[in-house]
Image (spheres, rainbow, N blue to C red):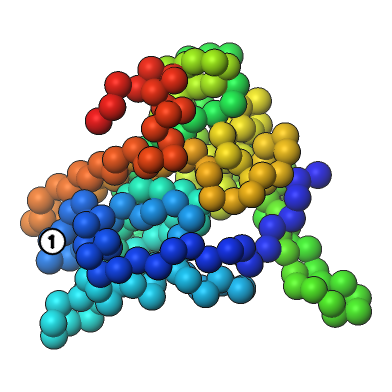
Amino acid sequence: MLPAMTPDSPPSASLSAGQLRARVLHRDEQCFVIDKPAGLAVHKAGRITDHLELYLPHLAEADGEPPKLAHRLDRDTAGCLILGRTPWALKRFGQMFAAGHVGKTYWAVADGVPEADSGIIDLPLLKRIEPKSPSGAGRSSWTILPDPAGQPAVTEYRVLGTGNGRSWLELRPRTGRTHQIRIHCAAIGCPLVGEPFYGPERLPPGNLHLLARSVAFRIAFEHAAVSAVAPAPAHMRDALSACGWQGE
């Protein structure tokens, strides 16, 4: 059985206004795309007190509202995150994500090499809530499990390089389930490097080798198409290089 997860892990370092602004990959009247740092939760949950929403006022205009999350990334995942700047944009992004009209590409480094150079992982996922103890001590937790009764979850993958028993993967999720890429990679015998929950051993959070590499979308016909690419984070660069990555 996979270990249960609770949302109370150590807070990451705070972001200054300058640091957050330096992470802007795209900006227009309707949205931002930022490069979210690994280890920073996007919003408050449980005992998490340091999260991205605290710093979004750094991106507000002098007389405007701060942008808001248009979707989510796992705390341990780095890379492209879309922020809506207007109520219309937030509603539109919600519709586009639900319909699969936002192109998302991820990079990962996995322990292990898939049997095929490319393929589709079709494995439904079920979120199971573990209740508090009968005495009321502790908090409820949750676990994501592969289960035929779960929600449909489909991920396309392609091997971009290999080295030292590891693989550099490009992944395109067709659905957006919690921890989908992480569980799907583990299910084909290739858990992600630094995986704290779904690998063969439980590791401390904060070193997951998973990057939301790019997003592509067109919010409406009268708006230009947007494509943004996040750089490889420092903690992934050595492992990527060992698998054949030649740098940005």
In this orientation, does residue 132 appear? yes
In this orientation, does residue 125 appear? no
User: On the picture, is 174 further left or further right than 6?
Assistant: left
Q: Residue at x 36, y 55 (%)?
A: 36
Q: Residue at x 46, y 28 (%)?
A: 239
Q: Which residue is drawn at 35% across and 66% down?
A: 15
Amino acid on which disc 1 is placed: Asp
Looking at this view, name the residue that lies furthest to the right.
Answer: 135
Q: Quadrant of the C terminus?
A: top left
Give residue 181's position: percent from left, percent from top.
Answer: 53, 40
Foreground: 49 or 216? 49
Q: Could you say which quadrant of the image residue 111 lies in?
A: top right
User: On the picture, is 69 further left or further right than 63?
Assistant: right
User: On the picture, is 229 further left or further right than 155?
Assistant: left
Give residue 217's position: percent from left, percent from top.
Answer: 24, 48
Give residue 106's position: percent from left, percent from top.
Answer: 40, 38
- Count of marks, rendered view: 1
Q: Quadrant of the N terminus?
A: top right
Circle 1 SS class: loop
160 in relation to 105, above or below: above
Give residue 223's position: percent from left, percent from top.
Answer: 10, 56
Mark 1 closeness class: few <14, some 14–19, many ≥20 residues within 10 Å: few
Q: Residue at x 13, y 85 (%)?
A: 63
Instruction: Residue under label 1, please give it.
Output: 28
Foreground: 74 or 76? 76
238 in relation to 127, above or below: above
Q: Could you say which quadrant of the image residue 159 lies in?
A: top left
Foreground: 167 or 145? 167
